[in-house]
Amino acid sequence: MTLLSTLLYILFVLAAIVLIVVILLQEGKGGGFSDALGTAGQQTFGVKAAGIHKFTMAVAIIFFGSALGIHLINKSAGTGDPGLSLNGPSAPAE
């Protein structure tokens, strides 16, 4: 595994963890946990969260970009299980 591939895997995992946390912190459109807490929930989690939406989009772009980079590196390196080919079983060589 190359250094670039290793760095992309690390970036991918970190972006996935951050994305999970950020999505769980976002305010719902209604009827969710913040409504169950009433006004105390709105004061705690904040009514306006425009910055968190931009941050979520940036992390999502990093996540998908690193996933695409990992795919391209693994595809060009030819690392893959030949038993998982989508072309079906090959004819035995005679």
Image (tube, helix red, strand yellow):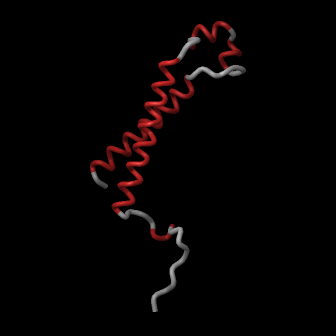
Residue 37: name its quadrant: top right
Query: In the picture, which quadrant includes the N terminus?
Result: bottom left
Q: Is residue 3 above or below residue 23?
A: below
Q: Is residue 55 left or right of residue 36?
A: left
Relative image position of residue 35 (x, y in whole percent): 69, 15
Residue positioned 51% across, 24% down in the render: 53
Q: Is residue 7 left or right of residue 89?
A: left
Depth order, front residue of 38/72 = 72
Residue positioned 67% across, 20% down in the render: 33
Depth order, front residue of 17/50 = 50
Relative image position of residue 25 (x, y in whole percent): 55, 23
Q: Is residue 20 above or below residue 38?
A: below
- Residue furthest to the left in view is 3
Residue positioned 38% across, 63% down in the render: 79
Depth order, front residue of 61/17 = 61
Relative image position of residue 40 (x, y in whole percent): 64, 7
Q: Is residue 55 above or below residue 77?
A: above
- Residue furthest to the bottom in view is 94
Q: How many marks?
A: 0
Residue positioned 57% across, 14% down in the render: 45
Q: Is residue 78 above or below residue 88?
A: above
Relative image position of residue 6 (x, y in whole percent): 33, 47
